[in-house]
Image: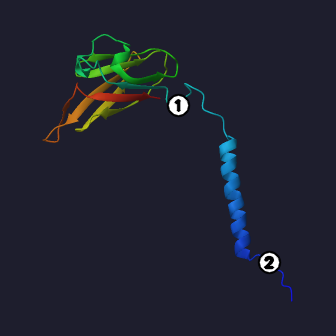
Amino acid sequence: MVRKLRPSPALVVAAVALFFAIGGSAFAVVGRTEAAQPRCSPGAVRGIAYVVGDPKKGIQNLPDTFSSAANLFGYRWNCSGGAISVRKNGNGFDVKFGNNAATVGLGTAVVSDGGAVAVMRNADGSFHVAPAGDVPNANFRARPDMQFVIAVI
């Protein structure tokens, strides 16, 4: 007596699911379904600056005129290719992304003991970064010694 082996419905469903899972992953790796976002387009990140200050003087001793010196930045990128410059302005800092039409700035403090930054756009197109730090009584005070990262959109 010869018996024909037929796959069970569960085996068929599992095989089909495996086929689509492998096929979908291969398609995702090989082909793109949408075009890459052009540089400097609306909604794209248009610039990033990690401001660290001069290692010998600290961030609180930045010049009060715009400077693009490489040692003032841990990282910087501008989609337009324009210069990125920074200056000290009161208790805060101004960051300029040359030839960049970004209108929104987002920032974060780079400290281990608590801190925050507020970012607002200046009339000249630069961005003002106001750093503050956490103190024991839960109020924020100016922290001109705090490194920060700013991204513009």
Task: Report, in whole angstroms, how far the alpha carbon at label 1 lies from the one at label 2.
Answer: 55 Å
Residue to which mark 1 is pinned: 44
| Residue 30 position in % (x across, y down) | 69, 42
* Nearest-to-viewer mark from 1 and 2: 2
- Residue drawn where x is 68% and y is 62% of the image: 18
Instruction: Give residue 121's quadrant in the image.
Output: top left
Compared to residue 26, the image places residue 66 above or below, namely: above
- Residue drawn where x is 67% and y is 57% of the image: 21
Q: Residue 128 shows which numbered tag?
A: none
| Residue 108 position in % (x across, y down) | 34, 34
- Residue drawn where x is 52% and y is 22% of the image: 79
Question: Left or right: where does residue 114 sit relative to residue 96?
Answer: left
Amino acid of disc 2: Arg
Amino acid of disc 1: Ala
Disc 1 crowd rating (10 Å Cα; few below 14, some 14-19, many 20+) is some
Query: Which residue lies most toward the front here?
Result: 1
Question: Left or right: where does residue 91 sit relative to residue 7?
Answer: left
Residue to which mark 2 is pinned: 6
Instruction: Give residue 87's quadrant in the image.
Output: top left
Whether label 1 touches label 2, CB < 8 Å = no
Q: Earlier in the sequence, mark 1 or mark 2?
A: 2
